[in-house]
Amino acid sequence: MTEHKKIPLPGEGGKDEGQESSLFERASGAFGLDGFGAAPMPKKLDERPLKRAKKVERKTTAIAEPTEASVEPATDVEAQLPVPAAAAPAPVVVEGAPLAPRLEGTRHTVDRAHLCQQGLIDPDGDVSELLEEFRIVKRQILRAARDKGTAKSRRVLISSPHPDEGKTFCAANLAIALAAERDMEVVLVDADIAKPSVLSTFGLPKASGFMDALSKPDIPVEDLVLGTDIANLWILPAGHVDNHGAEYVASEATADVLDRLTVGVPNRIVIFDTPPALAASPAAELAKHVGQVVVVARADQTGRNALEDTCQLLAACDDIKLLLNAANFSPSGRRFGSYYE
């Protein structure tokens, strides 16, 4: 083994006595490692031109957004100068529909015995099977209205494929059941303009109503709503009926009238008793303005084809429910209301 003292140092006993070289230099010459050397240093560096600050003019006028072609790269000095803040944009004011006015019509007395004679719910009576049935129905209506939370969802259209299937019976009972809710207003609209029957159902006198509000824009619809002594229940009669009633329902005035009844009043439900969908056109027109449709089918009478055609005519509303009326048989043997007897 060679002692470390005898290892020749650079400049001592090399191949050429007068040549100084390191181990790396000799290895570079032997193995061709010249390409791994450091890059040569330039003898003179280019002088970097000085940058001068540009004169900034301050103006009191509004600052326009610069276009892409007019934007110049900012120098280091310019970036340090304060930039005048742009004026805040003016707030955008969106005007919504006016809130529905309060209902303050004259209240009329409803004969409870007359309601019972027609098989309707007695608002002051005991819990009955009929009341329990419509309690279940109204829960579905209220749930859909609250889930959507719009004025349109609080408008409910009641119709049937043909006459004598119980649409007015169901509309009246649903209105009475809904009126029993706390802090709830219910407006029952007689939209069966060809054969109105809501006033006679409740034993109320004839009066102006829905059609008058559509044909005469200067008449506020809230002034035509009749009050009843049934808490929270209001009735809008059909009003003056003529041969052009269907055209009035199809006009733009319908949306304005319905907005005055529902917009901005989340505790108000409006129920429309409309003509049979396969017998008259107003039901299909009103379906464009409501958020829920209830199609009444009478057991052992309403056919499947009639139901399909009715749903197709009322398809302008995307929430259609079916209500089976006059059913005497229940496979589960249920008897709503019997628990309270």
Image (cartoon, rainbow, N blue to C red):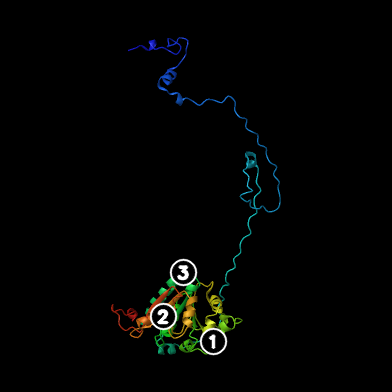
Q: Quadrant of the C terminus?
A: bottom left
Residue 271, image x and y in percent?
47, 79
Residue under pointer 2: 310
User: Tag 3: residue type?
Assistant: Lys
Residue under pointer 1: 244
Using the image, determine if residue 192 lies above or below residue 19: below
Q: Is residue 136 or residue 109 the one in the foreground?
A: 136
Q: Quadrant of residue 51?
A: top right
Is any part of residue 130 visible from this angle? Answer: no
User: Tag 1: residue type?
Assistant: His
Q: Is residue 185 or residue 271 the one in the foreground?
A: 271
Check contact, mark 1 vs mark 3: CB within 8 A. Answer: no
Tag in front: 1 or 3: 1
Spatial CA distance of label 3 from label 2 is 24 Å
Q: Please report whichever mark, 3 or 2, sits nearer to the chain's N-terminal start.
A: 3
Q: Please report whichever mark, 1 or 3, sits nearer to the chain's N-terminal start.
A: 3
Residue under pointer 3: 148
Using the image, determine if residue 124 lies above or below residue 90: below
For label 2, the crowd category at 10 Å Cα-Cα, with few meaning under 14, some 14 to 19 and many 20 or more, is many
Q: Quadrant of residue 26?
A: top left
